Amino acid sequence: METIIQGKAYVLGKNIDTDQIIPAEHLVYSLSDPEEVVLYGKYALSGVPPEQGGLPEGNVLFIDEGSCHSNYTIIIAGPNFGCGSSREHAPFALKVAGVKAIVAESYARIFYRNCVDGGFAIPYETAEQLNQVIKTGDELKIDVESNTIENLTSKITYKLNPLGDVFKIVEAGGIFAYARQENLMPQA
Amino acid sequence: MAQTITQKILSKAANRKFVDVGESIWLNVDILLTHDVCGPPTFDIFKQEFGADAKVWDPQKVVVLPDHYIFTANEHAHRNIDLLRQFAKEQGLEHYYDVGSDRYKGVCHVALAEEGFNLPGTVLFGTDSHTCTSGAFGMFGTGIGNTDAAFILGTGKLWEKVPESILFTFDGKMPAYLTAKDLILHILGDITTDGATYRAMEFDGEAIFSLPMEERMTLTNMAIEAGGMNGIIAADTIAESYVKARSPKPYEIFRSDPDARYHSKYRYNVSELEPVVAQPHSPDNRATVRSVQGTRITKSYIGSCTGGKLTDFVMAARILKGQKVSVTTNIVPATVKVARDLATEFYDGQSLKQIFEDAGCSIALPSCAACLGGPADTVGRSVDNDVVVSTTNRNFPGRMGSKHAGVYLASPLTAAASAITGKLTDPRDFL
């Protein structure tokens, strides 16, 4: 796994549910056919009301018109990120868009599990309200080994909560890799 | 050591005598549920990880109920049904309920109950957040993603963190104007949309055990709206007679120990509660209907796993009998069984179907329909700046279609009363 994750921040508010991450009408595309997979990138976060996307100013597109890939690598959000529907299409869409980590005050359980077990993006929790101090477009650097996030734009470093129990699954790259590593299922 | 009902069920599934809160344990799964949105990607992951010719761990334990995008012209949605059909065939899945056949059931959480898959003491995982609905039967039910579901398909097992429990006790006798929906919206207002994250929500008290199974399912269904891992109500004689009428299978009834530890406890007297709504755009944005009475609406929607069961329509019919609706009112039965019952269930001398037709409602075919928006041609989908009063479960921006629409979550009584006046209306005005 990468030990340093660096890229631009895209900042969101609280209770970003999976319908906002990938609206239900788009759940019909294949998650394995490469031509359709890119559509998940195209519509990632398209359900977020425009004024609430890319805080603090808002009205910042996560995906540019005509693109399937985002300029933003790290999502910064408030509490209860990924609440609502169980759709794994949500963390999948963020991954396709190019997101590598999410830093939120808390997560809904299913989204959190999906991120970890599917190996889509690392779901970090933080005690601080980072969406109040980090701005969309700030350059961030996450150090996976020291559990810190540095805002290279403002030169301020914040602590991330250690991943705890799930670190070994994140490190393995998902539940299947982990289960094979622990001999919980046959080797591939 | 004292345990809650949730701990006891998880202990059994882990072949242990006791499991402690916070432990991550491996569970043996009794039933895996999936549907047309999450089934195809789950099957893809299963084949990728276990091999193209791999067989599921136990074909009797896999239940596939297409329900999300059924009555649509969307070709991708049709393809997903084809993929379900193909997988069910090659794996010999007896519990596949094909679209377009007389086996089609409708909304999975309600169909699971009707078809006798809900058994007290068992463990159900489903690729749908409202899998917690089944907890009304004194069992553990929770939602998961495709990867976890594929893992279960291959191994019959999944890890889970034993949750702390929150106990909600409802004392008193349910007044005629109050419904399970009002109770759960009340709780959501108190604990908010993440108040139960990673926790079990356990319900008990005289008022709860007076409710029919369908109403109990409304309560446990919306546990996820508070972030709950599961919602649960211990099985009593009402639950047992429901189960026995539908399944010959054995089951085991668990109850929380009197000295079990809880994260917190809430106690309500139902005689002090009022009809409430969750205002846009969050299920915890509670207000009494009286306090928002008169707010203009453009649509009323009565349907979904939360509010499309027979008991929901009986409640709506009590209000709509002899009345006319003044806004578009969609009646969306959760299942084929519920749809049939609309014609045979009578209120005050008229069938529910007749009552709804006379009132000017439109009755749709059974599926999830506009609860989650769905493809553009979905019945009841919100458009533009619609203001919808709905018996569904979620009202985050865009949930029912348009991200500019506002959705008020309400009981079937409130949705019906509001449909008549075209404004949010307390059902007591019509009772």
Image: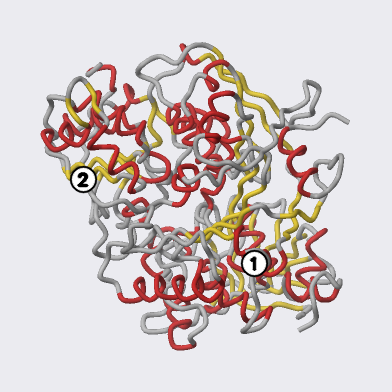
Residue A65: x and y in percent read 36, 80
Q: What's the CA distance linking mark 1 and mark 2?
A: 37 Å
Circle 1 crowding by C-alpha within 10 Å: few under 14, some 14–19, many from 20: many
Label 1 sits on a secondary structure element that is helix
Q: Which residue is mark 2?
A: B363
* Relative to A138, B378 lies left or right: left
Circle 2 crowding by C-alpha within 10 Å: few under 14, some 14–19, many from 20: some
The amino acid type, in three-letter code, at marker 1 is Leu
The one of B102 and B45 positioned closer to us in this rendering: B102
Q: Look at the image and tell me whether residue B343 can be seen.
A: yes
Query: Which residue: 82% across, 68% down?
Result: A168
Q: Is residue B262 above or below residue B365?
A: above
Q: Chain of mark 1?
A: B
Q: Is residue B85 above or below residue B262?
A: below
Q: Look at the image and tell me whether residue A154 can be seen.
A: no
Query: Which residue: 51% across, 74% down?
Result: B87
Q: Is residue B55 above or below residue A18?
A: below
* Relative to B369, B142 lies left or right: right
Label 2 sits on a secondary structure element that is strand
Q: Which residue is mark 1?
A: B153
Earlier sequence position, callout 1 versus callout 2:
1
Quarter of the image with the C terminus of chain B is top left
The one of B154 and A42 positioned closer to us in this rendering: B154
The amino acid type, in three-letter code, at marker 2 is Ile
